[in-house]
Structures are given as C-alpha cells and as structure tokens.
Amino acid sequence: MELNQQNRNFSTSTIVLDTVAEQLADVDFTLPDYCPDIEKILKCTLTPKVQSKNLSGGQLRIDGYCIVNVLYVENINKTIRCCEQSVSFSQCFTVKETPDNAVIITKTKQEYINCRALSPRRLVMHGAFSLYAKVFATDSKNIYVPDNENLECLKKAVRCADLKAFCQEQFNVCEEINVADKPKIESILYSTVTATIIDSKAVTGKLMVNGETNISIFYLCNVETGESGKIDYVIPFNQIIDCEGVDENTVNCIQCSIMSYDLRLKNDLVNENPSIVVDIKICVSEEGYILQDEEIICDAYSVKYAVGQEKEQVSMLSEIQPINETFIQKMNIHTDDGKISKVLDIYCDSVTSESRITDKGAEVFGKINICMLALNNDEYPIFIDRTAEYEHPVSQATDCNALKNINSQISSVSYRMSADDEVEIRCELKVSAVAIKEEQYEVIKSIEVYEDKELPCEKCALTLYYASKGENLWNIAKSHRTKLDMLLEENSTEQMVLENAQMLLIPRV
C-alpha cells in the first residue's frame, strides 16, 4: 500500500539555461568629411548594448547593437577626437524548457578589439564580445508527510526559504540634461552609465524600487583648441513593479542592470549650449522569499509490515540575505611617456566580480580596469589603462556558504598626483549580492507499506541490548522494530546519540 502524501511543498529558483556565445564585430570605417585625419589612435573600445530579449517556442532571442568607439589624436592641432560606428547583432539560444514565468539575465563582456589605420582616414576594426545568457524558472519541491499512525518517522526540523515571488520588468529612464552652467559642449567623446537600487518597499503584489543612474560624460568644449570638460550627473528613478506573491513579509533579492543607453546632443535655437537627451533602458529582477520552519522525513519504517522507500537529495536555502556594501580600492598609474602635465579624465572601463568562501567567511574579488587620459610634458595627449586586482570580505554574510547575483561597480573615482609621472587613484566600489546558506538533506521521496508481508512477532516483552558509545537510538529502534518514543521512555533518556556505552531495555510492541 502506497501511503498518501500531503500537499506540502516549497519553491526555489532553478537554472534552465546557462550559456555564452561569442559575437564578432567587424567594422571598415571611413572618417566623415568633418573629422580631421588620424595621427595616433589612443583607445578603441567595444560597448555591447542589449535592446530586447524574448523567450518563445523554446528559443531565447537576444537582439542589440555594439558601439565601436575610436579615440584618436588628430594631425592638425594635436587635439583629441573620436569616431563611432554601430554594429547590430542577434543571437538565438535553444531552451529545453520554456517556463511561463521565466526571468532572463544577460551580461556582455568585451573580449578584444583590434584597430588598424589603413590610411589617415580609413580604419579597420576587428573585435569580439561574449554574450552571457541565463534563464531562471521556479521549481516546486514536495515535502513528504506520510499519513499512517503505525509508521515510525525520523523527523528533522529545518529552516526553509520558500520562493513566493519571481518577476522581471524593463523600463526606460529618460531625461534632458541642461548643462548651461558647464562649458559649452561641441562633441561627446565618450560616456559611462551605471544604475543602482537605493531602497525598495513591498506591498501585496507590488514592489516599489527607488534607484539612481550615474552618468559621466567626457566631451570637447572647443574642437579647435581641444579644450575638454566633464559632466557627472545623477538621475533618480522610481518604479512600481507588478510582482505576484510579494508582500511586506518577503525577503526581496533585487537585481538591477542597464541593458542599453543612448546619449545625444539636442541643439536649441534659444540657448547656445545644447542639452543632452538621455534614454536608458533598465531591467529589474526580483526574487521574494519567505523563511519558515519545516519538518522533513529522513527515514521511516513500520513495526508490523515490511516497507519499501525511495530517497532523494534535496537542497534547501536555510538563510538568505541581500548584501549591499561599499569599500575603497587604491591603485597607482605610472606613465612611461614622461611627465604628466595635466590629467584630463580618469574612469573605470570594466569591473569583474567573483566570490569564494574561506575560513574567514565570504569574499568578493575581481579586477578593475582604470583608464586615464592626460597630457604629457609636450602637451600631447596620452592614454593609459591599468588593471588592478581587488578583494573584499563581505561583513554582512557571516553565516553563509555561497554568494549569488554578484555585481560590483565603481561609484566614484578620485585621484592625486603622487609624482610627476605617477597618479594615485582612489576608487569607491559598491558590491551587491545575495548571501545564502544552502544545505543538502537526504529525505524520503515516497514509501510503500507491504501489508501482505507482515513481520514476525517477538515472543518476549523486553530485550536487553548493550549499546556502544556513539550509537543512534533511531537505528537501534529501527533494527529491533520498536517505537522510538517507547525506547526513549523505557530508558529515561532524550538523547538520540549515546555519549557512553550502556545497557538498553528494548520494549516490544
């Protein structure tokens, strides 16, 4: 007889796709007539931007474009200029399962970019970037609870994080930046944009997130003289996300990423200085958990009949904690091109982030790539980039065995000249992650009682058993086909594992 199973279950997020594909970006570019000839290439970058991601019919389709930006020194006034070219891309991945409530996480990483000038006006660029894609879905797991009074069950009280809310939403942040108090903008050379969640609040079925986008723009004030300027601007955003299952009691783990952004100059006939139109596409993902106490069945037997059971390994999150920490990382940039007469701009090109668990706790580590644009002693533009490693112990993750959803980004960069040819840089990094404690349990998946196979009855009422140190009373009760509570009561003990060898009285049912 197969016993009934009660409808008790918990949900977790599971990965149904985790893949990466390399995308090529080849550009044959001729400078427009209004751009002066190239004397020296300073920096060539490849910036991928995702426009859309769609999962349908077992296919995940990701569309976007990448911007190839070339920063160079022109041959007349020896000033800095730039040229850009966009290349579209499209990639499809096969997904074996197509869940209804899928959450799609994408990430891009520049692998390499080579730029060669065939002539002062013609460039050939060959690059590649990696497109990472993950698809998450909810996975429901049953907790087996047999309904039979003659069945002895070994129960274990555990803490379980039950996934109640799982959603994702994309939205745009648009604003027009008035830069009347700044030097006139004639040409944007390059820009960086980051987004962070400041705080969130959940009510029934709704998640309200408050965040900000940090925009940094390096531009030319005068294309003839090469005079440059920089704008740092913050755009706050507020978004209400429909998310079934979220409420005031859920532990909310939120991811925020920029899919794409567009900055363009808007010429105004009234004002001489053009404004900057900003359009940023942001993706926010939410996992909402409820921590609750559960009882799992690790073993079972019958005192009357033979039984058959099937076991399985179950993974449960017993702790889950969103992490947001800030720390300072210092590094030095030394130039081989002589003395530095002026630093024009310093910015972060990329940040990688990984995690590890050590004896001291959880730690985030990775690499920072810092770029510096400056003038040497001859007032000639130079470009230097350096990579530094960082590591940061996560103080909030004291009782976890893993970190997930890790994201590190630079919130600010400051510097000082420590020597004529050296710059000391101070980077403020923000780390967001989710600290989890994942535990593995062997539990009963199903059990069947064979009522046609009745076990023989013992003729004696009590059995004397000499138990060794470290023996488990559950195993003793099971091997002698008696009830555990009767064994504990007969021997006036509550401990399950014997601290010393002793004689036990084993009652018969």
Image (spheres, rainbow, N blue to C red):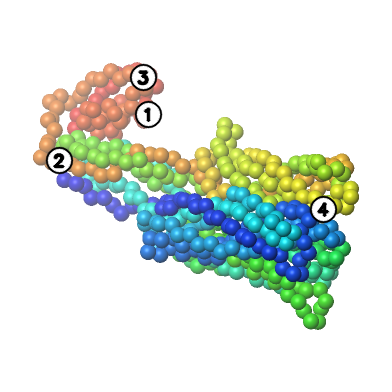
Q: Is residue 262 above or below residue 422?
A: below
Q: Is 412 in front, or is 500?
A: 412
Residue 469 disc label: 3
Query: Residue at horizontal 80%, vertical 68%?
Result: 185
* Residue 361, x across and y down, in percent: 58, 36
Q: Amino acid at mark 3?
A: Lys
Q: Residues within 10 Å of mark 3 (few under 14, many from 20)?
A: few
Q: Which residue is mark 2?
A: 450
Residue 143 disc label: none
Give residue 278's quadrant in the image: bottom right
Q: Is 14 in front, or is 155?
A: 14
Q: Which residue is mark 1?
A: 495
Residue 381 disc label: 4
Q: Secondary structure at mark 4?
A: strand
Can residue 440 be seen from the camera position used here? yes
Q: Amino acid at mark 1?
A: Gln
